[in-house]
Image: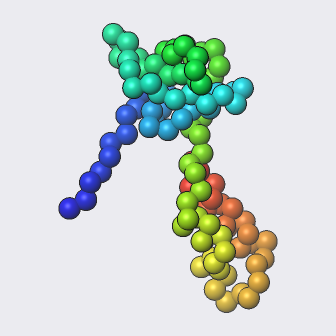
Amino acid sequence: MSTHTIPRTAQAAGITYDLDRDLIDVYGARWTWTGTTDTDGTPFVQTGDDTPQRLTHVYWTDGPLIPAPLPVTYADRHAAFTTPACAATVSSATPHTVAALLGRFRRRAA
């Protein structure tokens, strides 16, 4: 039997945000969910030691917000040093194999 974690989500301006991940605003600041909401259910986020603010307020003043990239895992590093499946017959990296590898990393960070 496997355990699944359901991420906490919230909406601001019709966009659904995963509150389990940090959010980055247009100025590069990381916003983290404080674990609290107001009476309307709007989550509070904060950056550093600043006062928590509503997610909708941060979206309208500092947005749009994007999810912070996931950290690079051991599996990601291992994949970078092993030969991609599309290059099984090629002994050295080609522009195509490097592009495929970068594409895998991009999908992982999204």
Residue 16 versus residue 42 in the image, above or below: below
Can residue 58 be seen at all in this image of the molecule? yes
Residue 29 versus residue 74 in the image, above or below: above
Residue 69 versus residue 94 in the image, above or below: above
Image quarter hosting the N terminus = bottom left
Which residue is at the front of the view, 80 or 106? 80
- Percent position (x, y) of residue 98? 73, 69
The reply, left or right, for residue 92 in relation to residue 29 is: right
Which residue is at the front of the view, 106 or 76? 76
Residue 84 versus residue 28 in the image, above or below: below
Residue placed at 55% from the left, 60% from the top? Answer: 73
- Percent position (x, y) of residue 57? 55, 13
Residue placed at 63% from the left, 54% from the top? Answer: 106
The reply, left or right, for residue 57 in relation to residue 27 is: left
The reply, left or right, for residue 96 in relation to residue 13 is: right
- Percent position (x, y) of residue 46? 54, 22
